[in-house]
Image (cartoon, coloured by chain):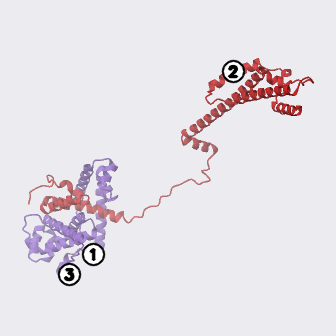
Chain colours: A red, B purple
Amino acid sequence: MKDVTFSNCKFSSDMVPYMYAELSAAETSSFESHLLECTACTDEFASLSIARFEVYDWKKVEFDGLETPVFSIPFESSADAAPSWIDKLRAAFSAGWAVPTVAFAGLAVVCVFAGILVSTRNNADVAADLRDTRTTAENPAVETAAAVVEPGPSLNSSKAETRAKSQFRAINASAAKRVQSRRVPRSASPSNLWELKERSARNFQKNVPRLNEFVEDEDTSLRLAELFDDVGTRN
Amino acid sequence: MLTDLTDEKLVELAVLKNSEAFGEIVKRWERKIFALCFGMLGREDDARDAAQETFIAAYRNIANFRGEAKVSSWLHRIAVNQCLTTKRRAKTRSEDFLGDEFGEEDRVFVAPAHRSPANTTEATERLTIVRQAVSSLPVDLRQVIVMKEFEEMTFQEISETLDLPLSTVKSRLYTALRQLRLKLDRVPLEIS
């Protein structure tokens, strides 16, 4: 038998884990074999076991039989805890400034885009209207179509027909220009629209018609029908 | 009086077939051997059976005791052997009940199950002593032993909870048990 004291025994560190069954199977077997050979470790283990068992017995007698106490928490009733509008607002913002900030920012962005879209359409309409005004001023065929003089008795049917056709072509050309002018180019940027708006405003100021200078016959479709009717009857 | 004799003297008398002398040995070491068996097996029932078999084996082999070691060490070694045997039995799931193999005289050494008022008083006093001994431990030692025994935490869990190295936790528990043992030794713990 080895004459070894507990303090210098290499298995001394395994004693407490062995007592609480926290050694591996190999370590347990090794320690148990050592206990059979080492008196110092066996006596020390017995000494610790006595102390441990006394604590265990004390716990079993004075603690294990105790009932777990029931803890009552003084929660507030639903009536007392009714939140005021200030509390609700505080709760909404207490959840974090990110949510309302993001919502407000999103709303602002939507409003800005809506405003840009509306202004873009307005600019396109203004530009189209100004182009129409300039076209009618530059194209006397349209004006003369309104002021077609009643053919005299000396005018024959072929000349009237030719004149009607030329007037019809002029009307179609002006209508086509009007349609083209109303198409807002996709590549139009806000800056281009702004320039267009400026230009159209300037042109509009130059070409602001007076009340008494408006051409009476704006509705060329009616004039066209009348012209064709006139041609048909002439024959 | 047998209570005034040393353990070695009692063994000498027991070798001469003095059953009362061996009974005194059992009375002195019953609880401690029971605690040792509990420390090895972890269960009261198994520890009780192992302790009984320890004393039976000691009585049967008392003639082989040469006096080279202390009686306590001799009994400890027998108890360790019995506990390991119990563990092997539990593994192979074969019960070897020794109670039927022995005669009437062996039953003298079985731990008495009856509780006399004196025993109850002694038990109460012992619990008070243990409580005071644990309370008198330093906080860091008391903390570890309470977490281990009352909360049944593993060493790893205690280490993480207290933010201490694993070796420190084991060392503190060892120190706590040693200090408790010294405190309890100052007040003799009577066998119940």
Q: Can residue B1 be seen in this view?
A: no
Q: Is residue A117 visible?
A: yes
Residue B86 is situated, as x and y percent measured from the top left of the image, at: 21, 70
Pointer 1 residue: B113
Q: What element carries label 2?
A: helix
Residue B72 is situated, as x and y percent measured from the top left of the image, at: 15, 65
Quadrant in the rendering for residue A47: bottom left
Q: Residues within 10 Å of mark 1 (few under 14, many from 20)?
A: few
- Chain bearing tag 2 is A
Q: Which residue is drawn at 80% across and 23% down?
A: A141
* Disc 2 versus disc 3: nearer the observer: 2
Pointer 3 residue: B100
The amino acid at mark 3 is Asp
Q: Residue at x 34, y 58 (%)?
A: B151
Quadrant in the rendering for residue A139: top right
Q: Is mark 3 on a helix, strand or loop?
A: helix
Q: Residue A212, relative to residue B28: is it above or below?
A: above
Q: Is residue A103 left or right of residue B54?
A: right
The amino acid at mark 2 is Glu
Q: Is mark 1 on a helix, strand or loop?
A: loop
Disc 2 from disc 3: Cα separation:
120 Å
Q: Which of B164 and B132 is in front in this view?
A: B164
Residue A198 marker = 2
Q: Is residue B34 left or right of residue A136?
A: left
Q: How crowded is mark 3: few (under 14 residues within 10 Å), some or many (20 or more)?
A: few
